[in-house]
Amino acid sequence: MKWPNETAAELIAFYGNPVLHSSVNAKWERENIVDLVPPYAMRYSWGPPVTKLRLHRKCRDAFGEALLAIKRLYGTQQDIEAHRMHLTGGTLMVRLKRGSTKSWSTHAFGAAIDIDPQRNPFRSKWRPGFIPIEAARAFESCGLIWRGANGDRDPMHFQAVDRR
Ligand SMILES: [Zn+2]
């Protein structure tokens, strides 16, 4: 899948416009956001179990394949948890990009997931002890873009949006 680039115009042309009068566009959400039941047990980094992840219909399968790749990589729930790949900060969140007053986050389009935010803090460059590099590569092998690559500073974040 070829993803849109990270500009408002390309994002809206591909995913539609999630925002209406500064809040979530309920019609857009009904028509575009679908559930992904994770292929292994996940929980939010603040505690509750994840029953389903909410993602855009155009990229849900890429995220599903990425989580399946993690399951294949580690094999057991215990090993997945040892690598902290069961922890998420969430997917769909209608909010602005951090540090911006006008650009919507790729999370607002249901086109991103955060993994283990506590160990992969925003504004840090990836280093050992963060998300395992083989797990990040598994996401990338499913076509997702990792914002911990190339010295980028959002190592928890994977998106179905290009950064060219
Ligand atoms: Zn994120």
Image (cartoon, rainbow, N blue to C red):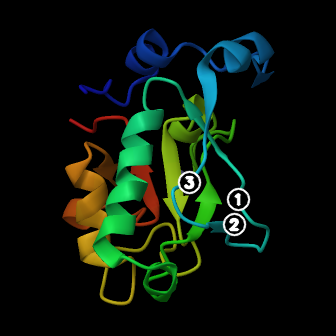
- Provide residue 33's location: percent of width, then percent of height: 63, 26
The total of numbered circles placed on residues is 3
Residue 58's image quarter?
top left
Q: Which residue is mark 1?
A: 50
- Provide residue 63's location: percent of width, then percent of height: 43, 45
Residue at 53%, 58% (x, y): give it: 114
Using the numbered discs, state the Cα–Cα distance from disc 2 to disc 1 in whole angstroms.
6 Å
Of the image marks 2 and 1, the number of the one nearer the N terminus? 2
Please tell me whether residue 88 is drawn above or below residue 64 in the rendered image: below
Q: Is residue 141 left or right of residue 126?
A: left
Q: Is residue 146 left or right of residue 12?
A: left
Residue at 54%, 72% (x, y): give it: 116
Tell me whether the residue at label 2 lies in contact with that at label 1, contact meaning CB atoms closer than 8 angstroms.
Answer: yes
Q: Residues within 10 Å of mark 3 (few under 14, many from 20)?
A: some
Q: Which residue is mark 2?
A: 44
Per the image, label 1 sits on a secondary structure element best described as loop
Of the image marks 2 and 3, the number of the one nearer the N terminus? 3
- Provide residue 72's location: percent of width, then percent of height: 32, 67
Quadrant holding the C terminus:
top left
Residue 43's image quarter?
bottom right
Residue at 72%, 54% (x, y): give it: 51
> Does the closest atom of ligand 1 sit within 8 Å of the Cβ of label 3?
no
Using the numbered discs, state the Cα–Cα distance from disc 2 to disc 3 in whole angstroms.
12 Å
Of the image marks 3 and 1, the number of the one nearer the N terminus? 3
The front one of 104 and 139 is: 139
Per the image, label 3 sits on a secondary structure element best described as loop
- Residue 38 bears which disc, if any? 3
